[in-house]
């Protein structure tokens, strides 16, 4: 997925540097447009997933604080694979 993001950033940057006539309209279509549309909902989906995990853990542990301690490890758990990948 990263190559789509790089390509769309690069094409946006190039289109700004050129002097286009007013009648020319630049926009993404096809897979690039679908990728851009999917990125707009990503934050909400992550927040909904964390809330769902909190509710499930709260039901399993019958507590409100234990899910918080478990979910507090998520940032460090996601940082390690991202660091390894890049």
Image (cartoon, rainbow, N blue to C red):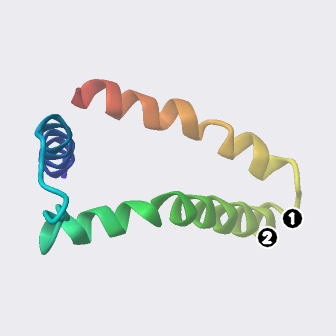
Say which residue label 1 marks: 62
C-alpha gap between disc 2 and disc 1: 5 Å
Q: Nearer the viewer, residue 24 or 16?
A: 24
Q: Nearer the viewer, residue 35 or 23?
A: 23
Neighbor class of circle 2 (other Cα within 10 Å; few <14, some 14-19, many 20+) is few
Numbered disc 1: secondary structure: loop
Numbered disc 2: secondary structure: helix
Q: Nearer the viewer, residue 4 or 22?
A: 22
Q: Please state if 13 lies on the left or on the right of 57 as rendered.
A: left
Neighbor class of circle 1 (other Cα within 10 Å; few <14, some 14-19, many 20+) is few
x and y percent of residue 70 in the render?
Answer: 68, 44
The quadrant holding residue 30 is: bottom left
Circles 2, 1 touching at the beta carbon (< 8 Å): yes
The quadrant holding residue 19 is: top left
Q: Please state if 73 lies on the left or on the right of 66 as rendered.
A: left
The quadrant holding residue 58 is: bottom right
x and y percent of residue 44 in the render?
Answer: 57, 64
Looking at the image, which residue is at 16% across and 34% down?
17
Q: Residue furthest front?
A: 22
Say which residue label 2 marks: 59
Q: Please state if 31 lies on the left or on the right of 83 as rendered.
A: left
x and y percent of residue 45 in the render?
Answer: 52, 66
In the rendered image of this protein, does residue 51 appear above or below residue 34? Answer: above
């Amino acid at each position: 997925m990263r190559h789509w993001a790089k390509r769309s950033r690069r094409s946006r940057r190039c289109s700004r540097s050129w002097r286009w006539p007013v009648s020319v309209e630049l926009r993404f279509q096809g897979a690039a447009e679908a990728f851009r549309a999917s990125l707009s909902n990503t934050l909400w989906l992550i927040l909904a997933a964390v809330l769902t995990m909190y509710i499930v853990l709260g039901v399993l542990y019958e507590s409100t604080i234990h899910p918080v301690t478990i979910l507090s490890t998520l940032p460090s758990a996601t940082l390690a694979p991202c660091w390894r990948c890049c």
